[in-house]
Structures are given as structure tokens and as C-alpha cells.
Image (cartoon, rainbow, N blue to C red):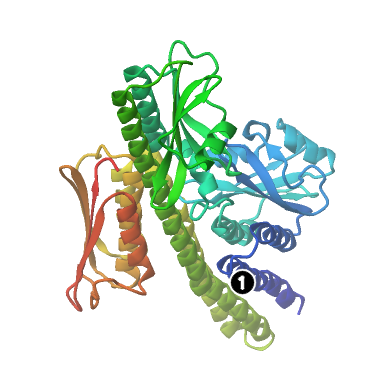
């Protein structure tokens, strides 16, 4: 009787985890407040592992870990605390992208020393997977020592994966206050080009300075690109002055200020003003018609760049939202159901141990097989969120790993015609990898393919990716409504400036073809 109870306890934990994942997924899909969701994740992590405390730390744009939620009475970890990655063992998780456990008695890290002073003896940190990177760290701390068990990791990994589904704050769509942040995060596309534009104005006119202003997080204008001439000693025009002049809606006016003559031109996109371009001449100097024309043309170019960056960022956020929705469904439909099945099987095995040992052994064997299958599925989902091979070894190696995984897990025959590593931007590389990842997953899971061929080649000025399978195919409706995976692939390709085509028919297999510019 005691033996049966001891064997049932792990199953009870997995059943509890299954219920927690179901509830948390529902919270994410319903748009519940992110802080509340992260707090509930911490509560479940602490309960499932009997830890004394739990915390979620999210990496901000500066690479600093910010504590977003806590559970348990540990004063060191308070919401809002900024943890430099060099002062905590959790920073190692961001770099190495894997779980880390350590004792606290002789820790060399300042924040772990504080935990030790609070009476804690051991910590376990797990990466919170993001899209192509590690988004943060889920940490639990114990008052007891000892090694980490595999069961602790299995219980915490799904919670970390759900934490990765929680949307970040200040999402891009519908938030004009974030245009300055978009340009700053995307220096290769927007900021460098804007800087080249204002430098051109200063070089070709008699201006003392020229700057592009975009709204920041609080809708306050921020100079995002600034060029100054040799005679300017004051820097760009004050943003409050720019806001006041824009409100006058007189773009052709040459404003005579104490600091000089100023043209303040809006950056329009339809009926929306995205920001401003300001060019200033020395006091008493007025621009000639050619200079005015150059500044007006430059403002038009700047508006086009900013609008393109805004649309691209919005498209990327929509793709990320689609993937969060897809992953939430996958967690519910596969992992959660597997855990529920394990809990039922364990309960049945416990009852059979009293009367039918042989039948109980069969139930235990079934539980083991189901657990292995669920673990494989979970690792696949985490790998989808965190494509380490792409970041570490390049696109060709990452695509090869996808085929190896397909052959190992599903027994498909694979053929790779990849050629040399293409000289593409990180955005194109990421888009192609995601398209291949989704197409290969569809070939294995839905098409029941026996052979999958992957091709990557240059077709100047584009690069082409083809995934060909001999599976059962399907009836193509053209727009593929209701097919989330196909819609995600198409959005990926279009966000990179390209297109996606699918050729398929029932019983004839499927060809997925993505063609994107070499430099998106």
C-alpha cells in the first residue's frame, strides 16, 4: 500500500502540471495581464517543486535581467529589480541557453550571495525560450541542498515554455509611441539610412544641423538621427519646440527662431504624422529654392523609411503572435494530453499493484513510453522557440539539423541540396529557417511523407528555398484560410520582402517554395 502511494505521487504532480499548463495557456490566449500570468507561473513552479521561492526574470533591450514576478518570501528578488547579467548565475543561462543548478554556500555571484544570506542553499535556473533567443530565466531556490532531479526539470520546462508565450510589453502594432524604439532596434535598416539622409542635407546645404524626430515610448519626440555642421554648437532643435511647430500645421513656413531659421517638415503616412525632419540655417540666413527642394525630398524619403520600418515591425509582431497562438494550441493538444494520460495510467497502475502485478507492469511500461513521447514532443516545441543551430552554425548547418531530426524522430528519408552558405541578412536567414521548420513539421505530422527533399539556391537577386515531400497532399484553396502553419510561413516570407508559393494536390505530395531578396 505504501509503495502504491509513493508511485502515485509523481503522477499527481504531472496531473497538477497538466492542469496548470491548461489554465496558463487559456490566460495567454485570452490576453490576461502579463504580470499576473508570470506571477501564476512562479506560484506553480514553487508548488510543484516544493521550492522556497520562484522568480521570472525577463531580459530587456540592454541585456539586463529584470525581475517581473516572484513567489515566496525572499526579499532579494522584488519585482522591478534589475539584475546585471555579470552579477548573477542566471546570466550564464542567457549565454549558454541551458538549465543551471548550483549550491549557494560558496557562490561568487553577488545576487546568489544575497540569496544564501537569506537562508537558501540551492538554485535552479531554466531558460525562458524566446523567438530565436533566450527571452529570460525562470528560477527556483531551495532551503535544502542536493542535486537537481530529472523530475524537477521535467516539471519546470513546460512552465518556462509558457512564460516564453507571454507577449512582451509595448507591442508594436497600434503604438506610434514606439517608432523611435523600432528604429533604434533596427539600425541596419532604418537608423543608418536616416542618418545618411540628414548628413546629406548638411553636406549639400548651408544648414547648421538637420535631424529626424520620432515619437518615443511616452509619445514625446526623440531625435533619432542628427547631423551637425561645423558652425553648430547647440545640437539639434529642442523636441518640445518641434512638437509645437508641428501642431501649427504649416509645413511650408520658414520659422525665425533665436537660434536661426528653421524648416520643420512632417513625416506623413496617409493621414498619420509619424514624426518630423528639421533643418536649421544660421540666424539671418534663408535657404534658396534648391535647398528647400532638397529638404522636402529628404523628408519624403525619411517618411518612406519610417513607414516601411513600422509596417515591417508590425508584420514581424503578427508572425510572433501567430506562433504564440500555435504553440499554445500545441501545448494543450499534445503535451497536456500526454501528461493527463500519464496521470490516469499511474492511477490505474496503483490500483493494479494490489491484485494484478503483471498487468500493473504493463501499465508502468505504457506510462514510460508515453512519458518519453511527451518529452520528445516538448523538446521539439522548445527547439522551435529557440533555434540554437541557426545562431551558432549558420543557415546551411541549421537546415541540415532539421533533416537529421526529421529522419531520427519520424524515419523519413531525406535529401539535402543546399550548396554554400548564402550571403543573406539575419532577417532573411531567420525567415527561411522558420519556413523550412514549419514545412518539414507539416510533412512529418500531417502529410505522412516518406521522402523529404530540401533545396536552397540563389536566383539573383533572390534566394530560393524549396521543401518537397511525397506525402498525401491536400486540396489547395489558394488563400489557405484556416491553415495557421501555412499562413505563418507566408507571413514570414512576406515580412522578409518575398513571397511563398505552395503546389499540392491530394495524393500528389507538396512543394513549398519561398523566394526572398538576398538583403531584405
- Answer above or below: position of 503 versus 143: below
Could you say which is closer to the camera, residue 374 or residue 336? 336
Work out which quarter of the rendered image holds the N terminus and state it: bottom right
Q: Is residue 429 left or right of residue 217?
A: left
Q: Residue at x 52, y 76 (%)?
A: 366
Residue 426 is drawn in which quadrant?
top left
Per the image, label 1 sits on a secondary structure element best described as helix
Which sits in the foreground, 170 or 416?
Answer: 170
Judging depth in this view, the residue of 514 and 42 nearest the camera is 514
Residue 294, given in percent of the width and then of the height, sits at: 31, 28
In this picture, residue 83 sits left or right of residue 491: right
- Among the 4 quarters of the image, the one containing residue 501: bottom left
Q: Position of residue 304 (x, y in %)?
A: 34, 42
Quarter occupied by the C terminus:
top left
Q: List the single residue furthest toward the top.
A: 230
Q: Position of residue 295 (x, y in %)?
A: 35, 29
- Residue occupying the point 77% across, 52% down: 53
Asked if one can make out residue 227 in the rendered structure from this viewpoint, the answer is: no
Residue at far left of view: 459
At label 1, counting other C-alpha atoms closer than 10 Å, the crowd grade (few under 14, some 14-19, many 20 or more) is: many
Residue at which label 1 appears: 18
- Point 34% across, 18% down: residue: 203
In this picture, residue 290 sits left or right of residue 241: left
Total of numbered circles in the picture?
1
Residue furthest to the bottom in view is 355
407 and 512: which is toward the camera: 512
The correct choice, above or below, for 243 with respect to 444 in the image is: above
The answer to whether residue 24 shows anywhere in this view is yes
Quarter of image, res 429: top left
Amino acid at each position: 500500500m505504501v509503495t502504491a502511494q509513493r508511485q502515485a505521487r509523481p503522477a499527481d504532480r504531472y496531473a497538477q502540471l497538466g492542469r496548470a499548463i491548461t489554465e496558463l495557456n487559456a490566460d495567454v490566449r485570452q490576453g490576461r495581464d502579463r504580470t499576473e500570468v508570470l506571477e501564476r507561473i512562479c506560484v506553480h513552479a514553487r508548488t510543484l517543486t516544493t521550492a522556497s521561492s520562484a522568480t521570472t526574470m525577463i531580459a530587456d533591450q540592454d541585456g539586463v535581467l529584470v525581475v517581473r514576478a516572484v513567489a515566496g518570501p525572499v526579499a532579494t528578488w522584488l519585482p522591478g529589480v534589475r539584475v546585471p547579467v555579470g552579477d548573477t548565475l542566471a546570466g550564464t543561462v542567457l549565454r549558454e541557453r541551458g538549465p543551471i543548478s548550483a549550491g549557494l554556500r560558496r557562490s561568487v555571484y553577488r545576487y546568489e550571495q544575497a540569496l544564501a544570506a537569506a537562508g537558501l542553499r540551492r538554485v535552479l535556473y531554466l531558460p525562458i525560450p524566446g523567438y530565436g533567443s533566450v527571452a529570460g530565466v525562470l528560477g527556483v531556490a531551495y532551503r535544502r541542498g542536493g542535486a537537481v532531479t530529472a523530475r524537477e526539470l521535467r516539471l519546470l520546462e513546460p512552465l518556462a515554455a509558457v512564460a516564453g508565450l507571454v507577449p512582451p510589453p509595448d507591442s508594436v502594432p497600434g503604438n506610434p509611441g514606439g517608432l523611435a524604439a523600432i528604429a533604434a532596434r533596427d539600425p541596419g535598416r532604418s537608423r543608418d539610412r536616416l542618418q545618411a539622409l540628414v548628413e546629406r542635407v548638411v553636406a549639400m546645404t548651408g544648414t547648421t544641423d538637420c535631424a529626424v524626430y520620432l515619437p518615443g515610448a511616452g509619445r514625446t519626440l526623440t531625435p533619432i538621427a542628427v547631423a551637425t555642421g561645423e558652425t553648430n554648437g547647440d545640437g539639434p532643435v529642442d523636441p518640445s519646440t518641434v512638437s509645437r511647430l508641428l501642431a501649427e500645421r504649416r509645413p511650408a513656413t520658414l520659422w525665425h527662431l533665436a537660434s536661426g531659421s528653421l524648416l520643420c517638415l512632417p513625416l506623413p503616412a496617409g493621414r498619420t504624422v509619424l514624426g518630423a525632419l528639421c533643418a536649421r540655417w544660421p540666424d539671418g540666413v534663408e535657404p534658396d529654392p534648391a535647398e528647400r527642394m532638397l529638404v522636402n525630398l529628404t523628408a519624403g524619403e525619411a517618411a518612406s523609411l519610417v513607414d516601411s520600418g513600422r509596417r515591417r515591425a508590425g508584420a514581424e509582431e503578427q508572425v510572433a503572435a501567430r506562433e504564440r497562438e500555435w504553440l499554445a494550441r500545441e501545448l494543450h493538444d499534445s503535451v497536456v494530453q500526454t501528461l493527463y494520460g500519464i496521470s490516469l495510467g499511474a492511477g490505474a497502475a496503483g490500483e493494479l499493484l494490489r491484485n494484478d502485478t503483471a498487468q500493473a507492469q504493463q501499465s508502468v511500461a505504457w506510462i514510460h513510453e508515453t512519458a518519453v513521447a511527451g518529452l520528445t514532443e516538448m523538446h521539439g516545441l522548445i527547439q522551435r522557440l529557440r533555434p540554437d543551430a541557426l545562431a551558432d552554425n549558420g543557415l546551411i548547418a541549421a537546415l541540415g539539423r532539421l533533416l537529421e531530426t526529421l529522419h531520427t524522430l519520424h524515419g523519413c528519408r531525406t535529401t539535402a541540396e543546399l550548396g554554400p552558405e548564402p550571403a543573406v541578412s539575419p532577417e532573411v536567414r531567420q525567415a527561411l529557417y522558420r519556413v523550412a521548420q514549419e514545412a518539414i513539421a507539416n510533412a512529418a505530422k500531417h502529410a505522412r511523407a516518406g521522402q523529404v527533399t530540401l533545396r536552397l539556391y540563389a536566383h539573383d537577386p533572390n534566394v530560393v528555398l524549396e521543401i518537397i515531400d511525397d506525402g498525401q497532399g491536400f486540396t489547395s484553396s489558394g488563400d489557405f484560410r484556416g491553415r495557421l502553419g501555412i499562413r505563418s510561413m507566408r507571413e514570414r516570407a512576406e515580412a522578409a520582402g518575398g513571397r511563398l508559393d505552395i503546389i499540392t494536390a491530394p495524393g500528389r505530395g507538396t512543394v513549398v517554395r519561398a523566394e526572398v531578396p538576398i538583403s531584405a
